[in-house]
Image (cartoon, helix red, strand yellow):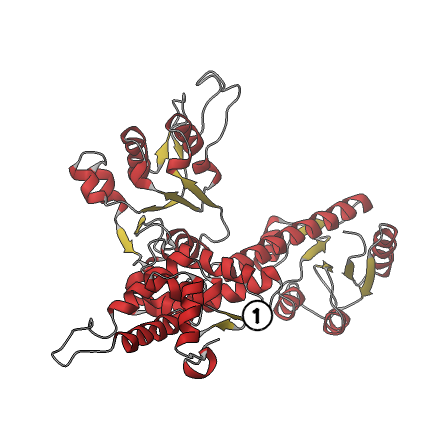
Amino acid sequence: MPSAKVLIVDDEKLIRWTLQECLQKEGYRAVTASCGKEALEAINESSFDIALLDYRLPDVRDLELLEEMKRRRPELPVVMITAHSTLENAVAAIRAGATDYIAKPFENQEIIHRVASVLENTRLKRFVERHREEKSREFSFDRVIGDSAEMKKVFALVKRVIDAGDTTILIQGESGTGKDVLAKAIHYNSARAERPYVNITCTAIPETLLESILFGHEKGAFTDARSQKKGLMEDADGGTVFLDEIGDMTLYLQSKLLRFLEEKTFRRVGGNQDITVDVRIIAATNKDLKKLVREEKFREDLYFRLKVIPVHVPPLRDRKGDIPLLVEAFIEEYNQEFKKRVKGISPALMKRLEEYSWPGNVRELKNSIERAMILTTGDIIDLADLPLDILDEADERLSRCGESPVRLTPRGLSLERLEEDLVRQALKLSGGNQTRAGRLLGLNRDQIRYRIEKFGINLKVDLDVG
């Protein structure tokens, strides 16, 4: 990492000069200090990528300067250099925060190699830390949208067990409710966040391959096994494996998974050696596992082993109070993706969204907002931007919630006034969209237009639409 800035702290002038010359030839920027006081002044005034620090200086005791430097600049990697190389000194320096340890006398090439190695390791560590922080933000519980009582119960349960070691979690809920998002939030907010997160959809992989993918295989285990291969369980050591659609796993693989959950060991396909890994299993399904157990399609012992912590994610129709929050979040997301400045949705459209049953749950809502964001030309999404099936079902629900059906009384009624009233209702429900209003009444666009003119309906003035 040439051009990195190095602080050299040593009371011997020749060593300071030698290190400075050596590192500058390699492209580093080198600054020197002859004592502890100068070193602290230097790190207060400027930032450094690495420090080379003599173990003993005239104005400080042994590791006092190292400890003070780490207190002021915890992220600064420090390499100790000393003529008094003992195991005790090395251990003490590392415990005090040193990154590495070099004994005098040393070769210039050794210094160059150590500096490059420490800088590269530091760069990788910071990259991993940034990646972990980004993932933590991306999959924080703040991103799992929900302010309803139902979702608050889910969050409260999950947060209590998030760091409960390797405790297995079973997430159940309909397709599209966000089980995978919740699983990621659990992983990236746990102590396992720095380790791998592996997502496996059990139905997406043929049974003959799934065992090998999960547990790996030995050379010659089957026709195409030309070499040994680790499975995803080994790759995820220390992290989390998310088994989606666990209800579709075959009974044979269920027995393999049960053994792993009970013993934390497995064997590669074709192998005879037990392999132990530290992995948390999060399983998810949209199926009724109890029913599958009764039908002998799912192992009862595996079911009980999986549901140590059962989490039920409610469907969107049972938490409609979350729809405005979800819509706002999706609009913000797609504003960034599509480079738009949509501010929100119309009140009429929000009413339709809250009346719709959302069989596809949050996924369907997100897809609908994505479509609307692509099609809309204004800064407010309106009824015309949403799929007809969503609006049609919502219209039916709203109609059922309106006034009682018309009843003929002995006093009679005016068909023309009734027709006008129905036309006005249809236009109001459709937000002024004449095609949709016509569909509600079984009329085409020309027929509804004729009636608008016939009854002198002004959409903007009379109905406050358009």
- Residue at image point 35% right, 48% down: 166
- Residue 461, image x and y in percent? 45, 84
Q: Along the line of sight, which residue is nearer the eye, 365 or 157?
A: 365
Q: Along the line of sight, which residue is nearer the eye, 40 or 385?
A: 385
Locate residue 305: give its quadrant. top left
Dot 1 amino acid type: Gly
- Residue 260, image x and y in percent? 33, 36
Q: State the count of labels.
A: 1
371 to the left or right of 205: right
Residue topped by disc 1: 378
Q: Residue furthest left?
A: 410
- Residue 99, image x and y in percent? 64, 54
- Residue 113, image x and y in percent? 75, 45
- Residue at image point 44% right, 69% down: 449
31 to the left or right of 389: right
Q: Is residue 426 visible?
A: yes
Q: Along the line of sight, which residue is nearer the eye, 370 or 161?
A: 370
In this rendering, the answer to whether 324 lies above or below 28 is below
Q: Is residue 105 visible?
A: no
Mark 1 surroundings within 10 Å by alpha-carbon count, few (fewer than 14), some (14 through 19), many (20 or more): few
SS at mark 1 in the image? loop
- Residue at image point 38% right, 22% down: 272
